[in-house]
């Protein structure tokens, strides 16, 4: 089921450029000149995922055709992340503050309390529509904020023990180094940054087991991709927030700022995407 999930998510990300945009983020209630947020019903949110509200399908970013698949995909990705971090001598359960950078409607972070029940959780995204739903439905279990495409986040230095982002750097072009520096700024020394990227293993998978995926078909229609996919440092197809970005893993490692130590690289950690774990170095 995972391949089709990733396919729908990719298509939805590409369509994100059609969102109503104000400055450097995507507005909530796109297409409306006025709106009203009604008072909440006051019912308490429970840490148990089954009792947390599920967002409407239009906010799923393509992760699954039904609620069960949407929820299970988020838990699967958190479980895999926890395993990879543990292999690198980091326990997600010991983290006091955790940030999901690019949280959408909370598909992954809603499951994090099962792994880190004592952690303070934050999610940020450039889509105010997704963040507004999260604020109204997933707080106080998780705290949320709308951010921008500019590499700046509203947190103090060294605030988080763990920052993770699934399928975000796959769409960041030109400002990737600045975003790595900003994420490093708000990460404490010895904290971990977990990111997923498209790399040479992704190319191999799109030519092999994942050749039927829509992303594979779309990329193989792009001359810049097809003529360079076997010899590249970085490939960008399409531009802006709908871009698809591929790195040779050694090149990505070379642009990681020296404030980090490279911990691990795990292909197929997030569908056909590769997970990279970085450790924030001490002062």
Image (spheres, grey):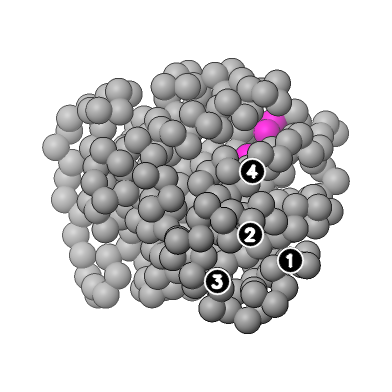
Q: Mostly what secondary structure, the magenta segment?
A: strand
Q: Earlier in the sequence, mark 1 or mark 4?
A: 1
Q: Which residue is mark 2?
A: 203
Residue 230 tag number:
1
Q: Nearer the viewer, residue 216 or 134?
A: 216
Q: Where is residue 48 drawn, in percent x and y?
A: 30, 23
Q: Are marks 1 and 2 in contact (CB under 8 Å)?
A: yes
Q: Earlier in the sequence, mark 1 or mark 2?
A: 2
Q: CA distance from mark 3 to mark 2?
A: 10 Å
Write down the region rendered in magenta: 191-195
Q: CA distance from mark 2 to mark 4?
A: 11 Å
Q: Quadrant of the N terminus?
A: top left
The local secondary structure at tag 1 comes to: loop
Q: Quadrant of the C terminus?
A: top right
Q: Are marks 3 and 4 in contact (CB under 8 Å)?
A: no
Residue visible at 40% across and 38% down in the picture: 74
Q: Which residue is mark 4?
A: 267
Is 234 covered by the magenta stretch? Answer: no
Quarter of the image where one finds residue 157:
top right
Seen in the image, is 56 located left or right of residue 235? left
Q: Which residue is mark 3?
A: 219
């Amino acid at each position: 089921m995972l391949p089709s999930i990733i396919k729908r998510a990719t298509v939805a990300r590409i369509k994100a450029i059609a969102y109503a945009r104000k400055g450097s983020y995507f507005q909530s209630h796109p297409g409306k000149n006025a709106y009203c947020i009604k008072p909440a019903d006051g019912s308490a949110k429970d840490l148990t995922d089954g009792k947390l509200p599920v967002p409407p399908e239009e906010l799923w970013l393509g992760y699954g055709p039904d609620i069960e698949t949407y929820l299970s995909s988020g838990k699967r990705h958190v479980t895999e992340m926890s395993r990879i971090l543990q292999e690198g001598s980091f326990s997600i359960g010991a983290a006091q503050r955790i940030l999901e950078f690019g949280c959408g409607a909370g598909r992954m972070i809603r499951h994090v309390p099962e792994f880190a029940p004592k952690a303070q959780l934050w999610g940020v995204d450039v889509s105010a529509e997704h963040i507004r739903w999260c604020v109204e439905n997933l707080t106080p279990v998780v705290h949320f904020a709308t951010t921008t495409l500019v590499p700046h986040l509203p947190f103090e230095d060294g605030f988080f023990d763990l920052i993770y982002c699934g399928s975000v750097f796959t769409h960041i072009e030109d400002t990737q180094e600045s975003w790595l520096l900003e994420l490093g700024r708000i990460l404490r020394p010895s904290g971990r940054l977990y990111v997923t990227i498209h790399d040479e293993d992704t190319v191999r998978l799109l030519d092999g087991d994942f050749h039927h995926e829509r992303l594979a078909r779309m990329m193989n229609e792009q001359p810049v991709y097809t003529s360079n996919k076997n010899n590249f440092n970085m490939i960008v197809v399409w531009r802006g927030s709908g871009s698809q970005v591929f790195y040779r893993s050694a090149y990505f490692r070379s642009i990681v700022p020296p404030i980090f130590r490279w911990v691990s690289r795990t292909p197929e950690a997030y569908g056909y995407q590769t997970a990279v774990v970085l450790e924030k170095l001490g002062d």
